[in-house]
């Protein structure tokens, strides 16, 4: 029997998605896009236009952990490690490859004094970098082609997919076997580690993870361990209070009663505005008091983001009507958008720096990057990601009888 894709983001043998969480993921992806545009006008890590936009990655990790626990925790005895890895690679890797290809195609158009002279990079070197990026193998700081020390110089955001894969492997090999109490202990210890890094670290933030250097890699691991594990813990807690133990959807009536007056529609907009507001708060403390900003970012990751996820799930309802369609669209394009936009950010950044442009002067280009990235993400989803995942699922996944 052929495995079909019922919706653009799920297989028919997977559980239903929470539309509110799908929508939140899309909102976070758009915020990341706008944050990356603002990088062209920052003079240091203290004055980004959207000061905490990079924390959207931590929200992604929490959402990923929640979805992982929701989708796979009750398959512990039926799903093999190999089957799990195939499913995750089919879901994630096509867009990893697409991001690498787009990054390579635009590389020679991104000449900028801020990084190495791209014309000096040979085609052979670029092809090697493309292959490494497509295979999600990080480049060492001394060997990457842009000279910024990035793990993935053709498509910077791939660093978070590198850590996502690590989280997936940790889950299937170890974490899924742990009791909820042990998992809670891991979340607590990882949270303490993340807080220490944010508050006592050299930058007063957790805008780290994109390079293989000690500080960057350590920070990236801490971001993953806390947020991914916290998402898994949230999934287990919500499942434990399920009223009927349904395997198809958590019945969260015990929690939903707390938020009964709030509809799914309002829940989505409240959660979305909360995410945007938290990520847009001006930097706190400045250079003289870096620890203040560290406290704020710790609070976002450890307190506010988990609460937003719980609030989004606890409505126990699907968003319908226009809000439901917005959630579906945002959820569908969220991952493709995250994976295809950054090569155009390099291009925009180079254009701004080479022309010494102000934001108002470059505003048409910024709008073009936003709109073009969303359109490209949708095109990649429909014409590349879905058909390829369908083919790979039919070819490599076990078929239902």
Image (cartoon, helix red, strand yellow):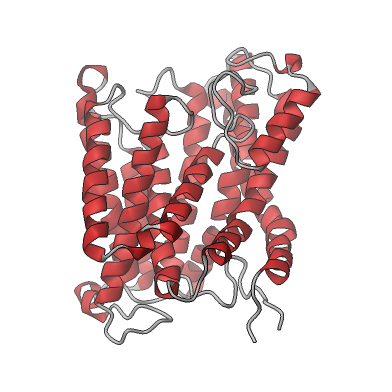
Q: Position of residue 370 (x, y in %)?
A: 59, 42
Taking depth in this image into account, of 114 and 236 the one nearest to the observer is: 236
Q: Position of residue 326 (x, y in %)?
A: 51, 63
Q: Is residue 273 visible?
A: no
| Residue 206 drawn above or below residue 97 | above
Taking depth in this image into account, of 204 and 256 the one nearest to the observer is: 204
Q: Position of residue 401 (x, y in %)?
A: 65, 87
Left or right: where does residue 362 sit relative to residue 30? right
In the displayed image of the protein, which residue is found farthest to the right? 123
**The image quarter in which residue 383 lies:** bottom right
Say which residue appears at 67% left-offset and 76% top-offset. Answer: 4
Taking depth in this image into account, of 151 and 104 the one nearest to the observer is: 151
Say which residue appears at 21% left-offset and 27% top-offset. Answer: 291
Left or right: where does residue 333 sit relative to residue 218? right
Q: Is residue 237 visible?
A: yes
Q: Position of residue 204 (x, y in %)?
A: 27, 27
Which quarter of the image is occupied by the N terminus? Answer: bottom right
Left or right: where does residue 299 sit relative to residue 222? left
Left or right: where does residue 383 sit relative to residue 302? right
């Amino acid at each position: 029997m052929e495995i079909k894709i019922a919706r653009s983001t799920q297989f028919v043998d997977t559980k239903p998605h929470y539309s509110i969480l799908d929508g939140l993921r899309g909102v976070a992806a758009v915020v990341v896009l706008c944050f990356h545009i603002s990088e062209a006008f920052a003079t240091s890590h203290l004055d980004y236009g959207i000061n905490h936009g990079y924390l959207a990655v931590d929200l992604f990790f929490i959402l990923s952990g929640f979805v992982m626990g929701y989708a796979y925790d009750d398959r512990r005895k039926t799903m093999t490690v190999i089957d799990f890895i195939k499913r995750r690679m089919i879901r994630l890797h096509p867009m990893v490859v697409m991001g690498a290809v787009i990054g390579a195609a635009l590389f020679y158009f991104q000449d900028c004094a801020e990084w190495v002279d791209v014309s000096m990079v040979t085609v052979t070197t670029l092809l090697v970098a493309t292959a490494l990026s497509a295979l999600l193998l990080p480049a060492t700081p001394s060997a990457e082609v842009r000279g910024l020390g990035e793990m993935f110089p053709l498509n910077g955001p791939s660093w978070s997919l590198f850590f996502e894969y690590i989280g997936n492997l940790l889950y299937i090999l170890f974490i899924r076997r742990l009791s909820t109490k042990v998992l809670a202990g891991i979340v607590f210890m990882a949270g303490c580690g993340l807080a220490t890094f944010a508050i006592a670290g050299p930058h007063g933030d957790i805008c780290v993870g994109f390079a293989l250097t000690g500080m960057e890699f350590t920070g990236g691991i801490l971001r993953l361990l806390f947020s991914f594990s916290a998402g898994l813990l949230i999934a287990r807690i919500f499942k434990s209070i399920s009223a009927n133990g349904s395997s198809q959807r958590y019945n969260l009536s015990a929690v939903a009663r707390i938020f009964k007056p709030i509809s799914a529609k309002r829940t989505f907009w409240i959660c979305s505005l909360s995410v945007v507001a938290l990520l847009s708060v001006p930097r706190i403390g400045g250079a003289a008091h870096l620890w203040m900003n560290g406290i704020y970012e710790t609070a976002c990751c450890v307190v506010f983001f988990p609460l937003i996820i719980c609030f989004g799930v606890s409505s126990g309802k699907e968003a319908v009507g226009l809000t439901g369609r917005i959630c579906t669209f945002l959820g569908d394009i969220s991952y493709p958008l995250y994976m295809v936009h950054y090569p155009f950010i390099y291009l925009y950044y180079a254009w701004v720096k080479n022309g010494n442009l102000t934001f108002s002067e470059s505003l048409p280009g910024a709008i073009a990057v936003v709109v073009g990235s969303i359109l490209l993400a949708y095109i990649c989803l429909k014409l590349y990601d879905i058909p390829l995942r369908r083919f790979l699922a039919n070819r490599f996944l076990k078929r239902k009888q």
